[in-house]
Amino acid sequence: MIIYGVNPVLEAIRSHPQRIHYIAVAKGAHTNRVFDAAKNAGVPVRILPPEHIDRAAGGGVHNGVIADLSEASYADFDEVVARDATNFALILDGITSARFCASRKGSAST
């Protein structure tokens, strides 16, 4: 799975460095924050021609940075609820709008 843009790539490095196969940076791009974060997390960085980054990002706004990640896996429900750290579980099905989820967040905590 390819993600692109400085902030999404930095978040992936911060939260899931083990899922990142590599980060690719366009030659000449100003991405010191990404280089530093990748180095600290032990994530390999490749420098590629800008047209390769453009193609991989599929025309999206990438700021000269992409990352190739392994797909996320689903958590086993029984394992999650069995953890001591799990205080409650909120189960949603068929939600297609992020706004719906955001608008319900306050009512779910009451």
Image (spheres, rainbow, N blue to C red):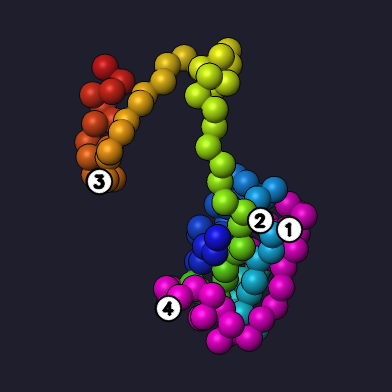
What secondary structure is found at the residue carrying circle 4?
Answer: loop
Which residue is found at the position 63% from the left and 86% from the top? 49
Q: Report the magenta residues as a range.
A: 33-61
Q: Amino acid at mark 3?
A: Ser
Spatial CA span between label 3 and label 2 = 28 Å
Q: Which residue is mark 2?
A: 20
Label whose residue precedes the other's in the sequence (4 or 2): 2
Q: Which residue is mark 1?
A: 43
Q: Amino acid at mark 1?
A: Val
Q: Which residue is mark 3?
A: 97
- The answer to whether the residue labelled 3 contacts the one labelled 4, judged by CB atoms less than 8 Å apart, is no
State whether residue 27 is above or below residue 66.
Answer: below
Dot 3 crowding, Cα within 10 Å, few <14, some 14–19, many 20+: few
Which residue is found at the position 72% from the left and 68% from the top? 45
Q: Which residue is mark 4?
A: 59
- Say if residue 89 shows up in the picture: yes
Locate residue 102, reporting x and y percent: 27, 38
What secondary structure is found at the residue carrying circle 3?
Answer: loop
Spatial CA span between label 1 and label 2 = 7 Å
Residue 28 picture quarter: bottom right
Q: Indicate which label's residue lies in the foreground, 4 or 1.
A: 4
**30 in the magenta segment:** no
- Say if residue 28 shows up in the picture: no
Which residue is found at the position 49% from the left and 73% from the top? 57
Locate residue 33, reporting x and y percent: 63, 63
Q: Quadrant of the N terminus?
A: bottom right
